[in-house]
Amino acid sequence: MIKARPKIGFHLLFKSKFWVMFLLGSLLFGIRWTKGAGYLDLYSILLNPILPGTAQREWIKEGENIERNIRLKLLEEDNIRLRRALSLKEINSDQRISAAVISRSSRNWWQQLEINKGAKAGVLLGQTVIGPGGLIGLVDSVTPLTSRVRLLTDPGHQVGAWIDRTKRHGILTGMGTNRPKLIFLNKNSLAKIGDTVTTSPASTLLPPNLTIGIVQFVNEKALPSPYAIVQLTASPEAIDWVQILKNNGQK
């Protein structure tokens, strides 16, 4: 006689399905509640032994080294540019004369200013005048106690300048604003926005390597020669003291 299999009760089957659905629902709720954090953690643990491999580590290391080298180069360039802009070049005390600005004509705001040092202090006609930021002009006239400085911004005032990056010379010409024009002597200036403009390192009329300004605009197609607009790093309208430098050959 064959015995019949015992039938699973309906309530047991319902109970087992309930717990399966309950566990599945709890899992889905937990994933949603934690935004998948636990799932991602588990996934990360499972992949950790194989990622990243040796090749990937080398790539990461190489990338970090390249980034570090680029960052150091940029910081070094910024440091050099800032040191030039702030006129941190060392000048011996016997080669400079400090003076205060005592007058500035409102009609000639961009052209000239008067300082409180003159011939008795050793100031001579044609000497270089710098302010916080770089070159601002040349001594145009001298009295025993005062001097007049002709600014780089004076229309028609011209001084030699150059861009070290391109090794290109030019003539800086005043335009009546704090943005004089740099007219290049070469047909191709190679200048770019952000280039530093200085006096030439081979200059005999001005002290070499004095910061003048930063290139703000370049017109390579201008005739008869290309030109750039230069933002002076020493703003004439904000200067209340200056230093007069003895030029090459002066003692």
Image (cartoon, rainbow, N blue to C red):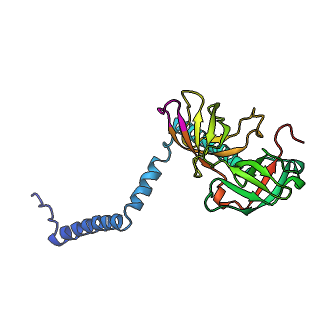
User: What are the residue bounds of the magenta stretch?
Assistant: 219-227
State the image quarter where residue 8 is shown. bottom left
State the image quarter where residue 10 is shown. bottom left
Q: Is residue 222 magenta?
A: yes
Q: Nearer the viewer, residue 72 or 156?
A: 156
Quadrant containing the N terminus is bottom left
Q: Residue at x 84, y 50 (%)?
A: 123
Q: Is residue 68 visible?
A: no
Quadrant containing the C terminus is top right
Q: Is residue 106 magenta?
A: no
Q: Nearer the viewer, residue 28 or 102?
A: 102
Query: How far across and down, in percent of the image, does residue 135 sit?
Result: 71, 48
Residue sitting farthest toward the bottom: 11
Q: In the picture shown, does residue 45 fall above or below 105?
A: above
Q: Is residue 138 visible?
A: yes
**Of helix, strand and loop, which mostly describes the magenta segment?**
loop
Query: How far across and down, in percent of the image, does residue 118 sit?
Result: 84, 55
**Is 116 left or right of 110, judged from the image as shown?**
right
Query: How far across and down, in percent of the image, does residue 105 sit?
Result: 66, 61
* Count of numbered circles in the view: 0
Q: In the picture shown, does residue 239 fall above or below 60?
A: below
Q: In the picture shown, does residue 77 fall above or below 185?
A: below
Q: Residue at x 90, y 55 (%)?
A: 120
